[in-house]
Protein backbone atom coordinates (compact mmCIF):
# COMPACT_ATOMS: atom_id res chain seq x y z
CA UNK A 1 0.00 0.00 0.00
CA UNK A 2 1.19 3.52 -0.78
CA UNK A 3 -0.15 7.07 -1.20
CA UNK A 4 -1.61 6.19 -4.63
CA UNK A 5 -3.18 2.99 -3.33
CA UNK A 6 -4.08 3.35 0.38
CA UNK A 7 -5.03 0.36 2.50
CA UNK A 8 -8.77 -0.35 2.54
CA UNK A 9 -10.73 0.27 5.71
CA UNK A 10 -11.01 -2.74 7.99
CA UNK A 11 -13.66 -5.07 6.58
CA UNK A 12 -13.87 -3.25 3.24
CA UNK A 13 -11.70 -5.86 1.55
CA UNK A 14 -14.28 -8.55 2.35
CA UNK A 15 -16.91 -7.04 0.07
CA UNK A 16 -14.54 -5.58 -2.52
CA UNK A 17 -13.01 -7.32 -5.55
CA UNK A 18 -9.76 -7.69 -3.65
CA UNK A 19 -6.24 -6.82 -4.76
CA UNK A 20 -5.47 -6.15 -8.41
CA UNK A 21 -2.25 -7.50 -9.92
CA UNK A 22 -2.76 -6.93 -13.66
CA UNK A 23 -4.19 -4.14 -15.80
CA UNK A 24 -5.88 -6.77 -17.96
CA UNK A 25 -9.16 -8.02 -16.44
CA UNK A 26 -8.89 -11.33 -18.29
CA UNK A 27 -5.51 -12.04 -16.70
CA UNK A 28 -6.86 -10.91 -13.34
CA UNK A 29 -9.80 -13.31 -13.62
CA UNK A 30 -7.53 -16.11 -14.81
CA UNK A 31 -5.23 -15.64 -11.81
CA UNK A 32 -8.21 -15.60 -9.45
CA UNK A 33 -9.59 -18.79 -11.01
CA UNK A 34 -6.20 -20.47 -10.82
CA UNK A 35 -5.78 -19.57 -7.14
CA UNK A 36 -9.29 -20.84 -6.33
CA UNK A 37 -8.56 -24.10 -8.12
CA UNK A 38 -5.19 -24.47 -6.36
CA UNK A 39 -6.85 -23.91 -2.98
CA UNK A 40 -9.53 -26.45 -3.81
CA UNK A 41 -6.96 -29.06 -4.91
CA UNK A 42 -4.99 -28.56 -1.70
CA UNK A 43 -8.15 -28.92 0.41
CA UNK A 44 -9.00 -32.18 -1.35
CA UNK A 45 -5.45 -33.54 -0.94
CA UNK A 46 -5.38 -32.55 2.73
CA UNK A 47 -8.75 -34.18 3.43
CA UNK A 48 -7.70 -37.32 1.55
CA UNK A 49 -4.53 -37.57 3.67
CA UNK A 50 -6.60 -37.17 6.87
CA UNK A 51 -9.09 -39.77 5.68
CA UNK A 52 -6.32 -42.27 4.87
CA UNK A 53 -4.76 -41.68 8.31
CA UNK A 54 -8.10 -42.15 10.09
CA UNK A 55 -8.88 -45.29 8.13
CA UNK A 56 -5.40 -46.68 8.78
CA UNK A 57 -5.92 -46.15 12.52
CA UNK A 58 -9.00 -48.37 12.12
CA UNK A 59 -6.98 -51.07 10.34
CA UNK A 60 -7.93 -50.06 6.79
CA UNK A 61 -5.05 -49.30 4.42
CA UNK A 62 -6.99 -47.10 2.00
CA UNK A 63 -3.91 -46.04 0.00
CA UNK A 64 -3.11 -49.66 -0.86
CA UNK A 65 -6.76 -50.51 -1.52
CA UNK A 66 -7.07 -47.54 -3.88
CA UNK A 67 -3.96 -48.63 -5.81
CA UNK A 68 -5.29 -52.19 -6.05
CA UNK A 69 -8.79 -51.16 -7.14
CA UNK A 70 -9.73 -52.12 -10.70
CA UNK A 71 -12.94 -50.39 -11.80
CA UNK A 72 -15.46 -52.20 -13.95
CA UNK A 73 -16.78 -50.77 -17.22
CA UNK A 74 -19.78 -49.10 -15.57
CA UNK A 75 -17.58 -47.29 -13.03
CA UNK A 76 -15.18 -46.22 -15.79
CA UNK A 77 -18.07 -44.82 -17.84
CA UNK A 78 -19.46 -42.92 -14.83
CA UNK A 79 -16.05 -41.48 -13.95
CA UNK A 80 -15.45 -40.48 -17.59
CA UNK A 81 -18.78 -38.63 -17.72
CA UNK A 82 -18.05 -36.84 -14.42
CA UNK A 83 -14.55 -35.90 -15.65
CA UNK A 84 -15.90 -34.52 -18.93
CA UNK A 85 -18.52 -32.44 -17.08
CA UNK A 86 -15.84 -31.09 -14.73
CA UNK A 87 -13.48 -30.16 -17.56
CA UNK A 88 -16.31 -28.50 -19.52
CA UNK A 89 -17.23 -26.35 -16.48
CA UNK A 90 -13.60 -25.55 -15.75
CA UNK A 91 -12.79 -24.46 -19.29
CA UNK A 92 -16.12 -22.81 -20.18
CA UNK A 93 -14.75 -19.31 -19.62
CA UNK A 94 -12.07 -19.86 -22.24
CA UNK A 95 -14.70 -20.52 -24.88
CA UNK A 96 -16.29 -17.07 -24.61
CA UNK A 97 -15.70 -14.80 -27.56
CA UNK A 98 -14.09 -11.46 -26.81
CA UNK A 99 -17.01 -9.59 -28.40
CA UNK A 100 -19.76 -11.58 -26.65
CA UNK A 101 -20.71 -13.27 -23.41
CA UNK A 102 -21.93 -16.31 -25.35
CA UNK A 103 -19.92 -19.51 -25.40
CA UNK A 104 -18.91 -21.46 -28.47
CA UNK A 105 -20.87 -24.72 -28.68
Image (tube, helix red, strand yellow):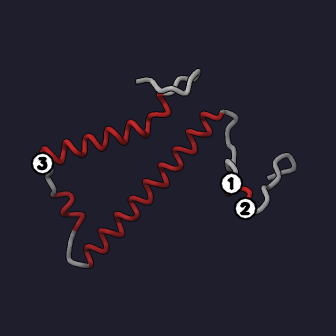
> At 38% from the left edge and 59% from the top edge, which residue is drawn?
45
Q: Nearer the viewer, residue 46 or 76?
A: 76
Query: N-terminal of the two: label 3 or label 1?
Result: 1
Q: Is residue 70 left or right of residue 92?
A: left
* Mark number displayed over residue 55: none
Return the residue at label 2: 11
Total numbered labels placed on residues in the image? 3
Q: Say whether marks 1 and 2 touch (CB < 8 Å).
A: yes
Q: Which numbered disc covers residue 15?
A: 1
Q: Is residue 103 left or right of residue 15?
A: left
Front disc: 3 or 1: 1
Q: Residue lying furthest front in this view? A: 102
Q: x%, y% of residue 71?
A: 15, 50
x and y, in percent, of residue 100 in the image = 56, 23
Query: What residue is pinned by disc 3?
Result: 72
Residue 30: horizontal and vertical position, in percent?
55, 39
Please state the horizontal and vertical placement of residue 87, each as a whole percent of the image. Answer: 37, 39
Amino acid sequence: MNADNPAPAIGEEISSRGPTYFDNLVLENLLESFMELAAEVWTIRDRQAVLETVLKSQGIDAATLIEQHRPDDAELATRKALREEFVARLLAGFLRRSDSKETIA
